[in-house]
Amino acid sequence: DYEKGNICRLNDFHPAWINWMSKSLEQQGISIRYVVANSSSYPYLDQTRFHFNSAGEILITSQEELMNCPSYNKYKYGLNELYGYAETLSPQIVRTRLLTRQIIFVLGTADTNRDWGLDKSCEADVQGKIRYERGLLYKHHLRTFVKSSPKSQHIWLEIPEVGHEAAAIFTHPRFIIELKALEFLKTYLFHVVKSARLISKVSRIQILQQIGNFESLKNL
């Protein structure tokens, strides 16, 4: 929505931190907000990984255990051996970009299956065994950096009782109301209507129908 100076991008995670156009667009008064939903893996900013113990506490995974997967910190799972455009960036630039860019992370609390689309590599599995768990652990990981990056603009949303289903995620009141509060909803609706790449035609229809039922959105 260039007229209002807003862009809402729903895509894979990596453009959020390697996109070189963000700064240029922001200088022109165009704000980009990235939306990352139920990602299969995440780019960690250092070599630390975490896991849940039987009591549900988050602990640091030992280096001895991580060495069962020697490549666990290679790009795109970490910052080792960057390639492509990312190869031109220093790890510090990557960290700064990711921590300071506007990103909404959306997690479906029922996204707990090791389905065919889940990344089951050892690099991904050291981040957690299922998408929801990986998201929670990554949230914890990023928050260990927030103290050194007070400009962090991340928002985390948990969508209850929703699994790995795009239409259910992107039509949920919690997600829609958040976009409205951020003044990104009209931009989002524009992409739902216009972008075949965003989501399937059937799902787009479901999204628009569901949004039409939200009483809180009558006065867009």
Image (cartoon, rainbow, N blue to C red):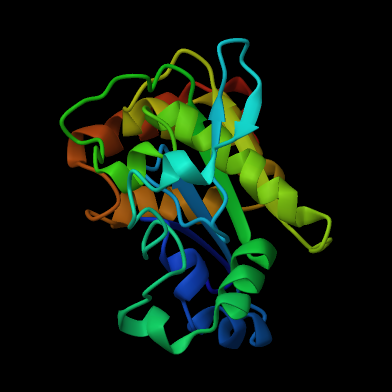
Vertical relation: 19 (above or below) 109: below
Vertical relation: 158 (above or below) 154: above
Q: Position of residue 32 (x, y in %)?
A: 57, 67
Q: Nearer the viewer, residue 18 or 174?
A: 18
Quarter of the image with the C terminus in it:
top right
> In the image, 13: left or right of 70?
right
Q: Identify the residue at the far left of this view.
A: 116
User: Can the viewer see residue 115?
Assistant: yes
Q: Nearer the viewer, residue 81 or 191?
A: 81
Q: So how many labels did they put on this image?
A: 0
Q: Position of residue 217 (x, y in %)?
A: 61, 31
Q: Position of residue 197 (x, y in %)?
A: 24, 55
Vertical relation: 151 (above or below) 58: below
Q: Quadrant of residue 140?
A: top right
Vertical relation: 84 (above or below) 119: below
Q: Quadrant of residue 113?
A: top left
> In the image, 80: left or right of 156?
left
Q: Residue at x 38, y 22 (%)?
A: 111
Q: Residue at x 51, y 69 (%)?
A: 17
Q: Residue at x 79, y 63 (%)?
A: 149
Q: Residue at x 39, y 84 (%)?
A: 87
Q: Quadrant of residue 52?
A: top right
Q: Position of residue 212 (x, y in %)?
A: 46, 28
User: Can the viewer see residue 182?
Assistant: no
Q: Nearer the viewer, residue 64 or 190?
A: 64
